[in-house]
Amino acid sequence: MNIKKAILALADGTVFEGRSFGAEGEAIGEVVFNTSLTGYQEILTDPSYMGQIVTMTYPHIGNYGTNDQDMESPRPYAEGLVVKEFCRHPSNWRSTISLEQFLVQHRIVGIEGIDTRALTKRIRDAGEQVGIISTIDLEPQHLVKRAKTSPGLIGRDLVKEVTCPAPYSYKTT
């Protein structure tokens, strides 16, 4: 398994170095946190996370994989995922694919191995801000500059972006 380096850079100049998982590339968005112990798939597919990079405060994420029944929407809306420790070998009878496969399939960049407590405190104390996760540009100051110049959610019509084009039926199991 070839684990690559990844960087999370915030607009205020804070930089975290970690390891990539999921898709390779970059994710730019408003960095937020979620304190749920479970439900990472539901969080990623919740339209309210459109344009955001989600930090999970629970330290172990990915241990039960993903499945079609836990989707909140037909697709994920979160831009990126930040975790302390990513589980590469899920175990759950409902799991159809791993979280890593899910992220790759939906082109979502993830970073693990950073101090999510410190990041959460930073967001709590300083407020939300734009950040960028990158597995391709590993120059911290360049990433900080890009985060600073990104408009983030300003000017976006998020309701229009997440509204489904046509009605559909929600099927329960």
Image (cartoon, rainbow, N blue to C red):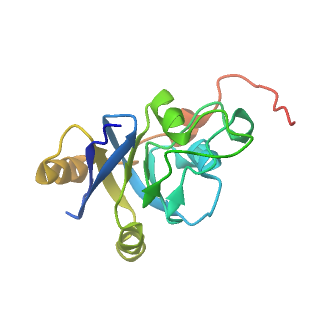
Q: Residue at x 60, y 41 (%)?
A: 45
Residue 130, picture quadrant: bottom left
In the image shown, does 161 or 86 lie closer to the viewer?
Answer: 86
State the quadrant of the C terminus: top right
Residue furthest top in the image:
166
Figure check: 100 above or below 57: above
| Residue 101 point in image, percent of width and height | 51, 33
Residue 66, picture quadrant: top right
Q: Residue at x 68, y 36 (%)?
A: 67
In the image shown, does 48 or 44 lie closer to the viewer?
Answer: 44
| Residue 48 point in image, percent of width and height | 58, 48
| Residue 85 point in image, percent of width and height | 44, 58
- Whether residue 154 can be seen here: no
Q: Which residue is drawn at 64% across and 48% down?
A: 64
Please state if 35 lies on the left or on the right of 119 as rendered.
right
State the quadrant of the N terminus: top left
| Residue 135 point in image, percent of width and height | 26, 40
- Whether residue 19 can be seen here: yes
Please state if 39 lies on the left or on the right of 112 as rendered.
right
Please state if 81 lies on the left or on the right of 14 as rendered.
right
